[in-house]
Amino acid sequence: MPRKERRVILICQCLVNPYCRVHILGQNFPLSLEVTDYLLRRNVGIIQYPCPETTAMGLMRNPQGRQQYDSIFFRTHCKELLRVPMLMVREFLKNRYRLCCFIGLENSPTCGIHWGAHKVNRYGTESPNPVDEPGDKDPVLRGIMAEILEEELNKERITVPFLELPALSPADSEKRRRFWQDLEAAVSPAS
């Protein structure tokens, strides 16, 4: 009889611990519960890395854009935070677990997957507030940590889907529906 597939995912910390989010943006415990329940009911293990914003700037930080976090110092900090989770990923893979995906957070300058055009303040720096109606030519980047994570996985020749939890979208939105479909596809047993 074939052995049941063992699966793990990599997830940003604020999806498991909403207190890590920028204090003025609020915490969404019901959504965190929904995500973790979904994964654990399907016997999918969760590897999380420490929140780079919290560990660099503390809990009472002000919201910032990707541009403010895009420094040599913050990137080095992110790489250091990923050191142990990447060891865990390698250990799980070595022991025949399947890494199913990474889940980041919508509109996060560090852990977002689709960081698009954002408003610019009077000082010429990026706001955490997205442009109301972005154009087709606006760049779409990963958040700083998500970008570094992708680089680290690529070094190991590990390819997984990068999913983005649309926490800012209503529960009945098309974005939210699509996220759950993509997550189901990612964690479904491999054929």
Image (cartoon, helix red, strand yellow):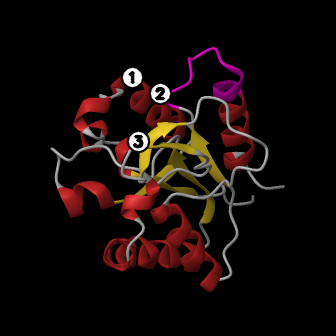
Look at the image and tell me in which quarter the C terminus lies: bottom right
On the image, numbered disc 2 is attached to which residue?
34
Q: Residue at x 66, y 18 (%)?
A: 173
What's the residue type where badge 1 is placed?
Pro
On the image, numbered disc 1 is attached to which residue?
30
Q: Residue at x 25, y 31 (%)?
A: 24
**Picture coordinates of residue 13, whole percent (x, y):** 36, 50
Q: Give the overall secondary structure of the magenta segment.
A: loop
Q: Which residues are magenta?
A: 167-177
Q: Between 179 and 143, which is closer to the camera in this rendering?
A: 143
Q: Which mark is residue 15?
A: 3
CA–CA distance in space, label 3 to label 2: 10 Å
Res 18 visible: yes
Q: Counting residues from the N terminus, which is met first, the one under dot 3 or under dot 1?
A: 3
Identify the image quadrant of residue 190. Answer: bottom right
What's the residue type where badge 2 is placed?
Glu
Q: Secondary structure at mark 1?
A: helix
CA–CA distance in space, label 1 to label 2: 6 Å
Identify the image quadrant of residue 95. Answer: bottom right
Q: Please indicate whether residue 119 sits to the left or right of residue 56 in the image.
A: right
What's the residue type where badge 3 is placed?
Leu
Q: Are marks 3 and 1 in contact (CB under 8 Å)?
A: no
Q: Between 58 and 171, which is closer to the camera in this rendering?
A: 58
Q: Are marks 1 and 2 in contact (CB under 8 Å)?
A: yes
Inspect the magenta stretch and tell me whether residue 57 lies in it. Answer: no
Q: Residue at x 68, y 37 (%)?
A: 134
